[in-house]
Image: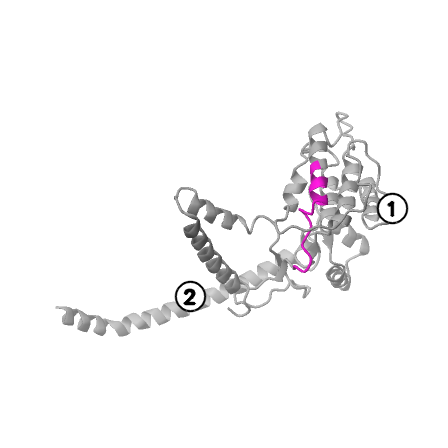
Amino acid sequence: AMMQDEQESSREMPGHVLGSVETEQQEGQQERGRDRELDQDEHEQDGDGLGGGLDADHGNPPSPAQIEELRSLLAILEGGGATPACRFLKPAPSEPIIDKFSPVIEDGFHAMDRAKVKIHHPFKKAYFHAFMLAWFAYDPVSLEAAKDALRVKGALEEEIEYNMYFNADWFHKCVKRRVLPPAQLYWRVRAVYAVYGTKVDPSDGLPLFNKTAWSKANNVLLEIIKGHCSDPPGFDFYHQKLTKRGEPAFNSLGLPLLECSRGTNLTECVHKQIMATFGSWVTGVEMGDALLAFFRHCYNQHISERRRLGF
């Protein structure tokens, strides 16, 4: 009976193989079609410009006064002005801040979100963008390359500057950023708190920060001094994205599309695995170490395949 089954299966094999080949050819055509659609979507998403320019509706557009105030704050962040005094912040260190670094880094979003602010406060948008610019410093080389590419396409300096402040997603896809050492980061973040924390909403007379928010802000500044927030020297958290075909990805201006490994999104999968593995199991130290080593190997192999050219 077994021999008869093998003979019947061998007679059916050619048709089955042919069907598989045809199916693979169809899937290959569909995959190439999806790749073309993906490339088109990337060009449409990144575009030749900045998502609509000055006339685009990016929520509540800032007033000219807010833009001018943000320009003044940027001068402070770049070392061109004195940090404003603020009675709600704890006294600044009297001695020079020593640069310290930690292997476990505070996430920028959580640092920004610690001081809760009113949703409809007129200075909320300007505050968050100022905090973003203070926390993440643009790499000057890649930033200038992005600006040059936009100038070639006819973008005005005013348009580039506006979108850098209030529609920065386009720049984040092709410009590297870095969290500066504590000696620089502390004064940048402190300046943002001092400038925007006391801004008053004319509709109700309430400031942007309440008592709890000021307490949270002081805690963030303390974490910065301890070195829990800055990028460790010598580490690059950026790499170029790859297309579905394993080729380097570029936007329509020819700038490399970047992917950043900094932040909590890419680590949540690790947290999930740890919780699933050790949340309900009773494991000893040796077994736990073996399980973590196995997971690290599989995870690193997967990331290597994901970022490998031509894979």
**Residue projecting furthest to the right:** 81
Q: Is residue 238 above or below residue 64?
A: below
Residue at image point 63% right, 57% down: 237
**Magenta residues, as a range?**
219-235
Query: Disc 2 marks which residue?
Result: 27
The reply, left or right, for residue 254 in relation to residue 67 is: left
User: From this viewpoint, is residue 255 visible?
Assistant: yes
User: Percent position (x, y) of residue 43?
Assistant: 62, 61
Query: Disc 1 marks which residue?
Result: 81
Asked if residue 168 lies in the magenta stretch, the reply is no
| Amino acid residing under circle 2 | Glu
In this rendering, which labeled residue sits more in front, label 1 or label 2?
1
Asked if residue 221 lies in the magenta stretch, the reply is yes
| Amino acid residing under circle 1 | Gly
Sooner in the amino-acid sequence: mark 1 or mark 2: 2
User: Percent position (x, y) of residue 196?
Assistant: 77, 37
Q: In which quarter of the image is residue 70?
A: top right
Tag 1 secondary structure:
loop
User: Percent position (x, y) of residue 3?
Assistant: 15, 72
Q: For the N terminus, which image quadrant?
A: bottom left
User: Percent position (x, y) of residue 285?
Assistant: 44, 49
The reply, left or right, for residue 6 in relation to residue 36 is: left
Residue at image point 87% right, 46% down: 81
Q: How far apart are marks 1 and 2 (CA)?
A: 61 Å
